[in-house]
Amino acid sequence: MILYELDGKEDFRFSPHVWKINMTLLHKGWTSNIERIPVKFSDKSPIEEKGFNTVPVLVDKEKWIGDSIKIAEYLENEYPERPSVFGDETAKNTTFILNKFIDYNFITSFARIIVGDIYNHIHPDDKEYFKVTREEMMGSTIEEISNTSKQRIPSLQKQLEPFRKILKENPYIAGSQPMYCDYILFGFFMWARCSSPKTLLDPTDPIREWRERMLDLYGGYARKARGYKDT
């Protein structure tokens, strides 16, 4: 099994979508025998040859699968004997909706807080490409966005309120055990943790307590990743 992931400077691996699959693979019991191939922002030739332009991309049994939730679905269908990351069909459908909701609502919110930090942790070969493309996407320079990044944290905290209410009553978004719906949001927190020293959550926030539980899963795999402790 091969996983193409985003290449960062000095082994920083911060792609939120790759983190969704990192956790999915561990959930389903894969702790070894996965070859990881880094892909740069500015050179995607290893995956472009197969028609993909974003990571993660998984290769299994000569099949190439892109898009994190499609990879999770493939693993679910191909290996039904392993623990489910979705649950029953109703829960799976709800997870697909939640995936769209979180990606749509939180990519920009997180990016406007951490984009300057990400810029400091990307591969040197990618700096010009990243700066040009991200400034075009956001309609402002990275420096200008970074100047107001900390002021955006309260807005993100407010945006997270629906999850906060769930996590006041349950240890995980899925309930008593983590599932793919947890890995979706956790991927964004790993995006921040692996690139930014900014503190996004208050010490007593139920979401912070959930994040700590997520960091401890699977022998503390995510906690051991190179990053910042308090993000």
Image (tube, grey):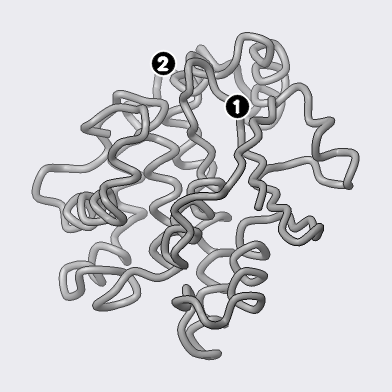
Instruction: Classify mark 1: helix, strand or loop.
Output: loop
Q: Where is residue 45 in the image (x, y as percent from the top left)?
A: 84, 30
Tell me which amino acid carries mark 2.
Answer: Asn
Q: Distance between the residues labelled 1 and 2?
A: 26 Å
- As helix, strand or loop, the secondary structure at mark 2 comes to helix
Q: Which mark is residue 7?
A: 1
Q: Which of marks 1 and 2 is nearer the N terminus?
A: 1
Whole-percent x, y for residue 226 in the image: 36, 28
What's the mark number on residue 211? Answer: none
Judge by depth and name the residue closer to the eye, 212 or 25.
25
Q: Where is 169 relative to 182, above or below?
A: below
Viewer-proximal residue among 132 and 129: 129
Residue count near mark 2 (Cα–Cα under 10 Å), binned few <14, some 14–19, many ≥20: few
Q: In the picture shown, does residue 194 fall above or below 63? A: above
Q: Residue furthest left?
A: 204
- Find residue 17 and report its horizontal and vertical position in percent: 56, 48
Point 22% across, 42% down: residue: 201
- Residue occupying image coordinates x 31% and y 64%: 163
In this picture, residue 78 sits left or right of residue 171: right
For the point 44% across and 55% down, the residue is: 23
Residue 169 percent location from the top left of the image? 16, 75
Q: Kindly identify which numbered label has been placed on residue 147.
A: 2
Snapshot quadrant of residue 206: bottom left
Label 1 Cα crowd, 10 Å radius (few <14 / some 14-19 / many 20+): many
Identify the amino acid type marked 1. Answer: Asp
Could you tell me if residue 184 is visible in this image?
no
Q: Residue at (21%, 50%) from the top-left corner? A: 212
